[in-house]
């Protein structure tokens, strides 16, 4: 904090008030409600409810469909991170090398980043529909692709839909990371090491580590939360509920199934996951501030 | 001669990447210029058809057939009101909150800091159901206030404005204090002009964030009057080529922003993540 500050009896609260007011009413109130729901069991007819301790949590952990979602979400974030990270890095390295048309490539590769996941999902829907879908036909001819019934095919569908726009995000950040590496370092390394590929893995890539780490967190957060719009406009969890992410499952159980206790408990588990991710993220931000 | 070979390989890889990004959009666009009958019999199209004006004007201006009571034009209007509202409100509240945290002696400062930043742990998707209940208790369903206010408290924007204020030299305030400037004047005359770049970046980023909201308008609105573009994708019906046209139009505002305000937008991403 500043050494020189204003001292006032009320002014500071005037400046804090607008944001705090919004947070208290629209965040803290619902969050408190979530905790209440999570520790409450409603009877089947919705007439009464009683304190349930950790019953909702125990129920979730013993529910196979929760673990299906859990495994799917972990796998989904891993695959999306891997695919979008490597393609984004590959393209960024190329764009950083070319002498001509750099800004054209940059402009044309970053705009999918701005498109809403739900829009991407609706588009993917057309390409995977049985009737018009080009990719559906292509894959169907190759191995009898049918995402309505086959779990693996449904995975392919949501992974393609989920990865497409996220390649842009990875591209932007990797390119920025590459451009931040000092020319002298690269020039010095050219003298020491002739092989382009070896130089990349021993010099450039380690220097990109902060960017890579940051992107892993961004991609995981994206796969956990932002893909909601994609799942809701593509498979809706199909074939059974194998392609429901944890967030999507909590939404369906709460909003459609009206099981507030379960949805509340699921939300709290997710909050703990976000807590872990956020701690990592803050460490990264602090690192960036101190060393750069 | 040898130097040209790797360079053309770079271009080749980039061009493949570009096609993966552009071809899907082109196919949907090309298909949106045909009649639905043609699409239904021949599938998705690569080449343009002759129904561009008819399809797009139908979607934009004609009620019914596409949605029941509203045109796409009205939905764009709603989306713009929502996005502008969210961007404005989040910039103003974050700027003020950060100022309060950095430039004032506050009792329980740490408490207020955490009160704001703990909210980062709870993305909208995790509190949709209870927030919906709160909104209906406050009678805010189906209103612009309901679409805008609850999602315009951005702890991340506050965090970055706070970081920025902390980097401003102490001497600025010392000098201003010698001149007898009060806290309100210091904020308006010194800090806001100094933060211009950041304000622009956060505003643009939050505008796209607001425009792209899907789940929130989906549960907050039950009458078509308040439907927004992105949520409308889920509920639209009507002929297939009209739907293609609507999907293409829905992308235009954020894509135009990112192309023309690229520098600001990227700065916004870096500050918001």
Image (cartoon, coloured by chain):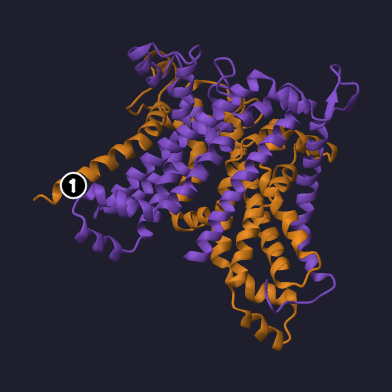
Chain colours: A purple, B orange
Residue at 40%, 50% (x, y): give it. Answer: A174
Residue at 46%, 45% (x, y): give it. Answer: B255
Where is residue B256? Give x, y as percent.
Answer: 46, 47
Which quadrant does the N terminus of chain A fall into? bottom right
Is residue B226 visible to the viewer in this orientation of the structure? Answer: no
Where is residue A219? Give x, y as percent.
Answer: 50, 41
Residue at 85%, 23% (x, y): give it. Answer: A42
Would residue A74 appear left or right of A18 to someone viewing this image?
Answer: left
- In this view, the residue farthest toward the bottom is B178
* Above-or-below relation of B166 to B261: below
For label 1, the crowd category at 10 Å Cα-Cα, with few meaning under 14, some 14 to 19 and many 20 or more, is few
- In this view, the residue farthest toward the left is B1
Would residue B172 appear left or right of A213 to someone viewing this image?
Answer: right
Given residues A213 and A113, the one toward you in this image is A213
Would residue A120 appear left or right of A261 to someone viewing this image?
Answer: left
Residue B66: image quadrant is: top right
* Residue holding disc 1: B6
Q: Chain ID for label 1?
A: B
Residue A276: image quadrant is: top right
Residue at 31%, 48% (x, y): give it. Answer: A201
């Amino acid at each position: 904090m500043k050494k020189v500050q204003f001292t006032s009896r009320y002014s500071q609260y005037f400046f804090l008030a607008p944001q705090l007011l919004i947070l208290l009413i629209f965040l803290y109130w619902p969050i408190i409600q979530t905790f209440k729901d999570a520790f409450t069991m409603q009877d089947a007819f919705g007439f009464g409810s009683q304190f349930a301790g950790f019953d909702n949590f125990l129920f979730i952990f013993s529910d196979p469909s929760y673990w299906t979602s859990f495994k799917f979400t972990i796998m989904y974030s891993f695959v999306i991170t891997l695919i979008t990270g490597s393609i984004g890095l590959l393209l960024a390295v190329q764009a950083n090398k070319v002498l001509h048309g750099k800004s054209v490539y940059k402009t044309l590769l970053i705009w999918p980043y701005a498109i809403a996941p739900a829009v991407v999902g609706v588009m993917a829907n057309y390409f995977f529909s049985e009737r018009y879908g080009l990719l559906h036909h292509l894959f169907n001819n190759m191995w009898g692709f049918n995402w309505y019934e086959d779990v693996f095919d449904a995975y392919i569908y949501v992974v393609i839909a989920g990865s497409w726009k996220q390649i842009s995000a990875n591209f932007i950040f990797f390119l920025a990371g590459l451009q931040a590496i000092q020319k002298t370092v690269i020039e010095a390394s050219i003298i020491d090491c002739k092989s382009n590929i070896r130089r990349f893995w021993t010099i450039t890539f380690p220097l990109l580590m902060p960017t890579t780490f940051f992107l892993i967190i961004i991609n995981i957060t994206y796969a956990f939360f932002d893909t909601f719009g994609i799942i809701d406009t593509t498979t809706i969890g199909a074939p059974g509920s194998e392609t429901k992410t944890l967030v999507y499952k909590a939404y369906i159980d709460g909003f459609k199934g009206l099981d507030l206790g379960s949805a509340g408990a699921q939300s709290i588990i997710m909050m703990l996951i976000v807590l872990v991710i956020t701690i990592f993220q803050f460490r990264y931000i602090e690192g960036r501030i101190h060393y750069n | 001669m040898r130097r040209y070979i790797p360079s053309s390989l770079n271009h080749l890889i980039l061009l493949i990447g570009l096609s993966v990004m552009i071809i899907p959009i082109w196919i949907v666009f090309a298909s949106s210029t045909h009649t639905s009958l043609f699409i239904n019999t021949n599938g998705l199209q690569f080449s343009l058809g002759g129904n561009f004006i008819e399809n797009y004007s139908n979607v934009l201006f004609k009620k019914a057939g596409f949605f029941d009571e509203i045109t796409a034009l009205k939905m764009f209007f709603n989306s713009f009101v929502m996005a502008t509202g969210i961007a404005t409100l989040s910039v103003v509240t974050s700027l003020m909150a950060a100022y309060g945290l950095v430039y004032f002696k506050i009792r329980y400062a740490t408490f207020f800091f955490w009160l704001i930043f703990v909210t980062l742990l709870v993305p909208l998707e995790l509190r949709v159901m209870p927030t919906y209940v709160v909104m209906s208790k406050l009678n805010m369903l189906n209103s612009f206030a309901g679409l805008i206010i609850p999602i315009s408290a951005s702890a991340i924007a506050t965090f970055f404005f706070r970081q920025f204020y902390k980097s401003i030299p102490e001497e600025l305030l010392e000098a201003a204090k010698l001149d007898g400037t009060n806290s309100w004047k210091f904020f308006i005359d010194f800090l806001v002009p100094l933060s211009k770049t950041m304000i622009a970046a956060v505003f643009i980023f939050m505008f796209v964030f607001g425009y792209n909201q899907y789940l929130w308008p989906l549960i907050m609105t039950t009458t078509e009057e308040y439907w927004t573009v992105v949520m409308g994708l889920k509920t639209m019906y009507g002929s297939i080529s009209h739907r293609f046209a609507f999907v293409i139009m829905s992308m235009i505002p954020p894509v135009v922003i990112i192309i023309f305000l690229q520098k600001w937008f990227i700065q916004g991403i870096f500050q918001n993540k």
